[in-house]
Amino acid sequence: MTEQHTALGLQDSTEVLYRISARLAERFAGVFAAETVERYVFESYTSLARTARISTHLPATTEHFANDRLSALATSRDPAPSEVPEVLFVCVRNAGRSQMAAALLTVEAKGRIRVRSAGSMPAAELDPAVIAAMSEMGLDLSASYPKPLTDDVVRASDVVITMGCGDSCPIYPGKHYEDWDLADPAQQSLKAVRAVRDEIHDHVRALVASLLDKPAPSTEGTSS
């Protein structure tokens, strides 16, 4: 998409973006000024429009993306530690590995972990074989979309897991970083994608255990 087309799309969608901004400003009242919310909405739209092939769903994805970024920003500014661990999965295109990992962790964690995913160079859409492989497990990713990696979601995360994106993820003290060495499922057969999916699932189960499983209380020093 050229800069001219992006600008034209933004101009045509301005009224819609102002309505989204008003809804989110009401949702985050007392947390962020309306001007901050509006800036995040317009920035989010521009970021997504750079790679979107079809603009029909851009308003909906913009509202979802801006809401998530504002939630992350609120979390990162809160001095109180969160009771719910926050995990961010990052790959290059956010069209395969990180999307599968996020979906699998969401299921395995059962609401006990906040999950996000992003891409250092996001694609226009998810890989069809990835959607197919996940649907075999009853997980529908057809409405998911690649999201650009932003500073706010990294700051909000307790654990950042990278998958082949090199040094593109900013490093902040106090975060736990892991790199999962996984094959890229892009343009691979469904059989190959299934293998990557299952390997990710194993990693995700181990991650859930490390974040949520608590050791039994020590009985050392107690009398019977």
Image: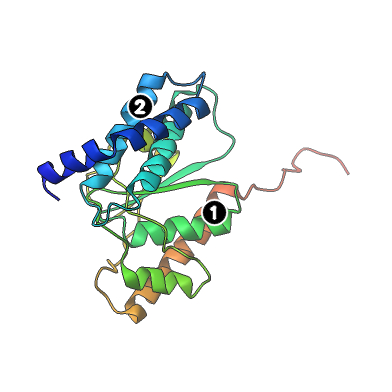
Say which residue label 2 marks.
38
Q: Using the image, determine if residue 196 lies above or below residue 55.
A: below
Say which residue label 1 marks.
208
**Is 168 positioned to the left or the right of 114 in the image?**
left
Assign a secondary structure to mark 1.
helix
Q: Nearer the viewer, mark 1 or mark 2?
A: 2
Between marks 1 and 2, how big is the CA–CA gap? 36 Å
Mark 1 crowd level (few <14, some 14–19, many ≥20, 10 Å Cα): some
The one nearer the camera, 200 or 122, is: 122
Q: Residue at x 39, y 26 (%)?
A: 37
The answer to whether one can see residue 198 in this image is: no
Q: Where is residue 2 shown, x and y percent of the image?
A: 11, 47
Q: Residue at x 50, y 54 (%)?
A: 207
The one nearer the camera, 189 or 143, is: 143
What colour-coding does the image apply? rainbow
- Amino acid bearing label 1: Val
**Is 69 positioned to the left or the right of 5 in the image?**
right
Q: Which mark is residue 28?
A: none
Mark 2 crowd level (few <14, some 14–19, many ≥20, 10 Å Cα): many
Q: Where is residue 8 shown, x and y percent of the image?
A: 17, 41
Instruction: Write down the quadrant of residue 172 in the picture.
Output: top left
The answer to whether one can see residue 21 in this image is: yes
Instruction: Write down the quadrant of residue 72 in the picture.
Output: top left
